[in-house]
């Protein structure tokens, strides 16, 4: 915050000519770049591995944060509609990621000395696999809806 405040008084301290421009002029290119990353990483969503879904989720989190931080520069209704779509996607991807982590943790509990945990760990792994599948059912459509929504910053 102090860095940004200092930059408001002396724009060159923020890193040159590009950063010295007004935030309103920079915001569209920043949002285009982050939204483009989400679009690119969301391609062929139904075939993405857990690792690639996690990358998509991180890019989406960055987009949501940027939308939140820059929302004051734009009309509220359009920003809210876009942000709501991003949050729906975040929820889906969050549940899917949690399921992957829960399965890995459950199965890691089973050791030679704790073979009694094999059955409950397997049951938990099956449950989280179903939960992940259910969470990702609407992913392709939600990504399509987000791509179809014009960026409020354009």
Image (cartoon, rainbow, N blue to C red):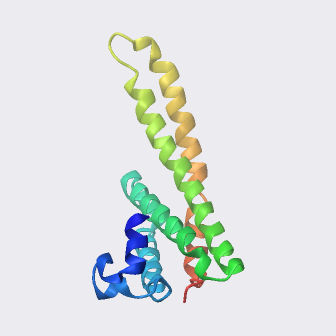
**Count of numbered circles in the view:** 0
- In this view, which residue lies farthest toward the right? 77
User: Which residue is depicted at the point 48% across and 47% down?
Assistant: 97
Which part of the image, by quadrant, shows the C terminus?
Answer: bottom right
Which residue is at a point 54% across and 78% down the rendered structure image?
147
Image: 65 above or below 72? above
Q: Residue at x 54, y 27 (%)?
A: 123
Residue at image position (44%, 19%) is: 118
Where is 67 relative to 61, above or below? below
Q: Position of residue 105 (x, y in %)?
A: 42, 31
Q: Nearer the viewer, residue 147 or 78?
A: 78
- Residue found at the very far left of the displayed protein: 16
As drawn, 39 above or below 150? above
Horizontal arrangement in the rendering, residue 27 relative to residue 16 (left or right): right
Choose between 2 and 45: the one closer to the eye.
2
Classify the position of the N terminus by image quarter: bottom left
Residue 104 image offset from top left, x and y in percent: 41, 35
Quadrant in the rendering for residue 139: bottom right
Q: Position of residue 40 (x, y in %)?
A: 40, 74
- List x then y, in percent, for residue 76: 69, 78
**Closest to the observer, 70 or 107:** 70
């Amino acid at each position: 915050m102090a860095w940004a405040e200092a930059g408001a008084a002396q724009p060159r301290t923020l890193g040159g000519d590009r950063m010295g421009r007004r935030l309103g002029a920079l915001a569209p290119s920043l949002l285009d770049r982050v939204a483009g990353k989400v679009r690119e990483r969301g391609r062929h969503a139904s075939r993405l591995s857990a690792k690639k879904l996690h990358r998509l989720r991180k890019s989406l989190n960055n987009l949501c944060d940027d939308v939140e931080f820059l929302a004051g520069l734009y009309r509220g209704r359009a920003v809210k509609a876009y942000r709501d779509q991003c949050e729906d996607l975040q929820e889906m991807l969050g549940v899917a990621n949690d399921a992957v982590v829960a399965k890995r943790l459950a199965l890691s509990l089973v050791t030679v000395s704790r073979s009694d945990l094999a059955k409950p760990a397997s049951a938990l792994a099956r449950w989280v696999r179903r939960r992940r599948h259910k969470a990702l059912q609407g992913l392709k459509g939600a990504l399509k809806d987000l791509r179809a929504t014009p960026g409020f910053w354009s």
